[in-house]
Amino acid sequence: MKSLLLLVFLGAGIVGARAADLVKGRVYLKNGTVVECTGNDRIELPKRSGRLKIWRDAFLKTKDKEWIEPEEIDSIVCWHVRTPEHPRRFVYAERPGWMWVYFTTPYMQACVYARKGYGIDTNGGIQVWQRIRIFSRSRVAYFLRKSGEEGFEDVGGANRRAKDRFRERLAQYVEDDPELAQRILRSSTGRGKTVSMLRDYCPIINLMSNE
């Protein structure tokens, strides 16, 4: 028996229909150029390690598609046509692939990877998809990257309880901010709120330079 689990983030309401796969947005390339999607153009939200697909005149007989290799892309900023005031950002990494940016600070970037992909609801909320089987489920996980690092650190699944091992993993990752590391170890919140604590991450070398 198979089913899809919808994980809802950032206040998005639970809806009966699947969130929009075709959204408005901009594609920021690593060479500094920006690919705009205006009018009837739409971006098809990417997943796994696939190429990005852009539909030109998506709802007309003249529709056509463009492909962009993920390695050429710095980031994608997307929004539902009804709620352009709620843009969502996606980035690509060779491991694990396309990720939704949970938050970014001057010192830390936290992302969510969903093997089954993503949607954006009409209210602008991000939706993360997961397939559930009897003995397994498709991957949804948190990935972290400190400022100056190239790769992302896999810190574990997003839909599990925040046990001590998870907190210890996060605390070890930010051991260069001892005060935050101790706060994480003493916390008792769920995984999402625990990861959100990393918004306060400020490595000790930066604290010393500001004195």
Image: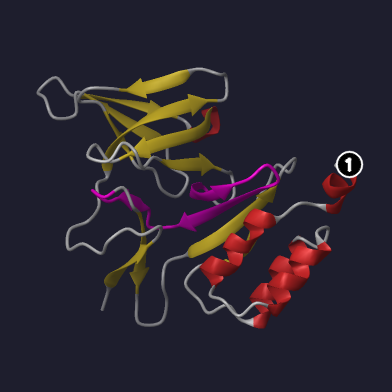
Q: Position of residue 162 (x, y in %)?
A: 58, 77
Inspect this view and state whether residue 172 appears.
no
On screen, residue 190 above or below 95: below
Q: Residue at x 57, y 19 (%)?
A: 31
**Residue 210, located in which quarter of the rendered image?**
top right
Coloration of the structure image: secondary structure
Q: Residue at x 83, y 58 (%)?
A: 176
Q: Nearer the viewer, residue 42 or 108?
A: 108
Is residue 103 inside the magenta stretch? yes
Q: Magenta-highlighted stretch: main secondary structure?
A: strand
Magenta stretch bounds: 97-123
Identify residue for label 1. Answer: 209
Q: Nearer the viewer, residue 11 or 27?
A: 11
Residue at disc 1, secondary structure = helix
Q: Nearer the viewer, residue 88 or 100?
A: 88
Q: Position of residue 28 (x, y in %)?
A: 49, 26
Q: Position of residue 120 (x, y in %)?
A: 31, 48
Mark 1, other Cα within 10 Å: few <14 / some 14–19 / many ≥20:
few
